[in-house]
Image: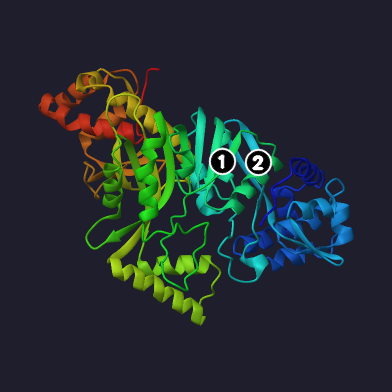
Amino acid sequence: MLPHPDPALCRRLAADLRAAGYSGTALREAWGPQADDALARGLREPALRALGRRDDPLAVLGRVWGLGATATAPELGAALPSLGIDGATALGLVVAADDVVRGGVLIRPQAFADADGDVEWWIASDLDEAALGGPLPEDHVLGVGGASQTLARIQLTRRAVTGLDIGTGCGIQALRLRRLVDRVVATDVSERALRFTRLNALLNDVDGIETRHGSLFDPVAGETFDRMASNPPFVITPRVAGVPAYEYRDGGMEGDALVAAVIGGVGAHLSPGGVAQSLGNWEYRGEESGLDRVRGWVDAAGEALDAWVIEREVLDPLAYAELWVRDGGTVPGTPEYARLIDAWLEDFAARGVTGVGFGYVLLRRPLAGGPTLARYERVAGGGEASFGPHLAACLEAHDRAALLDDAGLEASLLLVAPDVTEARHHRPGEEAPTVIELRQGGGFGRTLEVDPALAALVGACDGDLDVGSLIGAIAQLMDVDAAHLRDDLLPRVRELIDTGFLTFAEG
């Protein structure tokens, strides 16, 4: 078990890492782009070769904590003038044997930028498959992986007072939440994970994070929060003997029940106006859509919540099984790999699973009145780096439009979002386009096929004339009934506002 982190030792470690210039940029320059790419694929040998026998502090710490390899005691002692090998051992970060010291954990720089500026943290986690040379232990605490980076990128940027990180793992979401809220509670069923969270908070001099041991919402019974983030152990894993159940990814429930439990429990712990964002997997069973399953969980939760659920991809049972068997470190082509794949497929077949969806869930407790938002959609495009600000802007615009009746919407001045372009497709020799598309350059990169009337309305939204006047003018130009055109266009204008194609012109 990782020891409880000592604050004084963590401060000394931070001083040594800083003095060594232990940053992501410096490490990538030290072992080169090809080795860095190999490391991202789970191969550390190219980086080790590139570092060779360099004995400067950056290279030594890179071998020990960047790659989970070894250094001699004199090398590491020189690289840690403040902490020393004894201090690193007391923190549980190295294992010393004779004159050789091996990294007991990984400590890797993680850089990002938000509204408050550029940040780089050192994030400690357990050794990965490359360092271990085989499958992971079931109590493995994962570092900053693709899923956790995704969740961080989609987080809203609104500031608040209290936050909750459910299933904190190494603590990366708690650290990110703390940038936006005054106090964060981080929970996990793994005491080892909570100790990594405390270590990472101390190492990066981040206060205001409280860790609590327990499953899901048990540690926060009766409490409410303004913001929640959860990268829960959502991986669907067979609950049979002989199949590893990794704490960082497997929730211990059958099928997608863990994600259903997270969604079902959120409402009771959200303050008015509070927002919860999480990742999840959901099953497609027979003719039932995975998104319909999620809608059913939200509806059955007994809480009046706004919901925006975005499905990014759907994998068939075999592809899903291969993804997670490999993730645990089991190599294709081995008997163990074939046995685990078969266990997954048998488990899926027992429930009639035809596919597994992956996506994002945003739930919100309305400030007053009932829910106004219920979006369950499949969106495959866009760049995740802009999702958080995009979601925030879309929610703000939706809330404003939801307060307007049709007359209020007609009286509004709208603008085309600056990232929206139009494409028209013509058959050779024909003047009228056969297809008109509106394309979104940012956000989810949506492409919408529209008719000439809606295209004309969007093209005329420059903030000068209100929507009602524009509809009247278009009806006159097209020689159609203005009332019928209004009834057709206004619901679609609301959709364009909700999805970020149109914005309100005035304050």
- Specify the amino acid type for callout 2: Ala
Q: Nearer the viewer, residue 416 or 71?
A: 71
Measuring from the top left, give residue 285's x and y in whole percent: 27, 61
Image quarter in which the N terminus is found = bottom right
- Label 2 vs label 1: CA separation? 9 Å
Q: Which residue is label 1 attached to?
A: 174
Q: Secondary structure at mark 1?
A: helix
Measuring from the top left, give residue 200's x and y in whole percent: 66, 45
Label 2, residues with CA under 10 Å away: few <14, some 14-19, many ≥20: many
Q: Residue at x 38, y 33 (%)?
A: 394
Question: Is 385 situated left or right of 316 in this image?
Answer: right
Q: Nearer the viewer, residue 235 or 96?
A: 96
Question: Is 321 situated left or right of 93 in this image?
Answer: left
Q: Residue at x 29, y 19 (%)?
A: 412
Label 1, residues with CA under 10 Å away: few <14, some 14-19, many ≥20: many
Which badge, 2 or 1, comes first in the chain's sequence?
1
Query: Total label count?
Result: 2
Image quarter in which the C terminus is found = top left
Q: Which residue is label 2 attached to?
A: 201
Measuring from the top left, give residue 441's x and y in whole percent: 42, 40
